[in-house]
Image: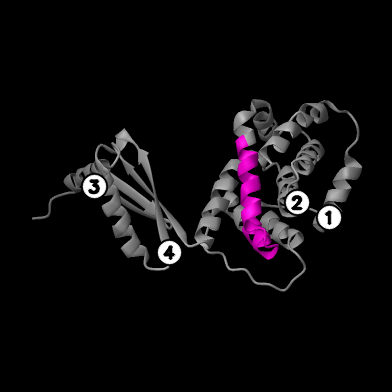
């Protein structure tokens, strides 16, 4: 799949230079989506989930609450993917697309350039999705992003979508930030502690980040929660306490 995607990238240059009218193609996209316009990020994501999903009365519960524009789009894609029974496939396709963006400056610039007409973006991303043999769910989703000038956010949306797929599988990703890498024994102890907090039936995966600016201690983030036990934060708390007037 990644090879097919790379072979499709030259289409961008050719399509971007084309002066031909793309209005008929855009009309076909609108008919396929069954929605005349997308007024906002949240409205767009709701319209997408309705348009892309099979016509079944099936209620899908999000395993994780996400916020912001990227969270809305990722949530809509999750719902559509679950209804189409294509969660793993869509996740793989998004990751392939993000990897292509990272390897191709031309492709990356194309997705971020808002001066490119929406018709051109739609035509380019449709041709790329077809040559890469993406699923209909992914293809329709990318068209929505192209229509709304949101292709520039695909990497962020993909990360949010990955959070949802992990949560769907019962995997909870925790991020620990420290000044230097944790020794294996401390990493194991932290992971076991988090497992006790999260409870049975779920699996904890730990990601370490290094940030010298926290001065010491650690910051743990998981399930939309943040436990800041860094020296930097403690110092700020002490500074605020010292600045408070003394009561006699």
- Secondary element at tag 3: helix
- Secondary element at tag 1: helix
Earlier sequence position, callout 1 versus callout 4? 1
Which residue is the site of mark 2?
Answer: 140
Earlier sequence position, callout 1 versus callout 3? 1
Q: Which residues are magenta?
A: 76-99
Residue 152, image x and y in percent? 64, 38
Callouts 1 and 2 close, C-beta under 8 Å? yes
Callouts 3 and 4 close, C-beta under 8 Å? no
- Secondary element at tag 2: helix
Q: Nearer the viewer, mark 2 or mark 4?
A: 4
Is residue 73 in sight in this rendering? no
Q: CA distance from mark 3 to mark 2?
A: 49 Å
- Which residue is depicted at the point 59% across and 47% down? 158
Which residue is the site of mark 1?
Answer: 32
Q: How many marks?
A: 4
In the rendered image, which quarter is residue 238 located in?
Answer: top left
Which residue is the site of mark 3?
Answer: 237
């Amino acid at each position: 799949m990644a090879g097919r995607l790379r072979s499709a990238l030259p289409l961008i240059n050719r399509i971007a230079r084309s002066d031909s009218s793309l209005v008929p193609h855009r009309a076909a996209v609108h008919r396929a989506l069954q929605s005349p316009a997308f007024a906002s990020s949240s409205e767009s994501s709701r319209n997408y989930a309705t348009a892309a999903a099979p016509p079944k009365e099936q209620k899908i519960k999000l395993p994780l609450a996400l916020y912001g524009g990227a969270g809305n789009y990722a949530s809509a894609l999750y719902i559509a993917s679950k209804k189409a029974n294509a969660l793993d496939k869509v996740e793989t396709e998004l990751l392939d697309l993000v990897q292509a963006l990272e390897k191709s400056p031309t492709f990356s610039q194309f997705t971020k350039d808002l001066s490119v007409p929406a018709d051109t973006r739609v035509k380019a991303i449709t041709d790329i999705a077809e040559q890469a043999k993406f699923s209909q769910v992914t293809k329709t989703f990318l068209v929505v992003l192209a229509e709304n000038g949101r292709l520039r956010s695909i990497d962020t949306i993909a990360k949010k979508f990955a959070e949802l797929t992990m949560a769907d599988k019962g995997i909870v990703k925790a991020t620990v930030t420290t000044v230097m890498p944790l020794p294996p024994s401390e990493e194991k102890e932290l992971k076991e502690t988090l497992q006790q907090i999260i409870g049975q039936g779920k699996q904890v995966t730990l990601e370490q980040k290094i940030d010298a600016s926290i001065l010491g201690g650690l910051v743990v983030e998981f399930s939309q929660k943040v436990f800041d036990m860094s020296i930097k934060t403690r110092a700020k708390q002490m500074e605020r306490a010292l600045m408070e007037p003394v009561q006699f």
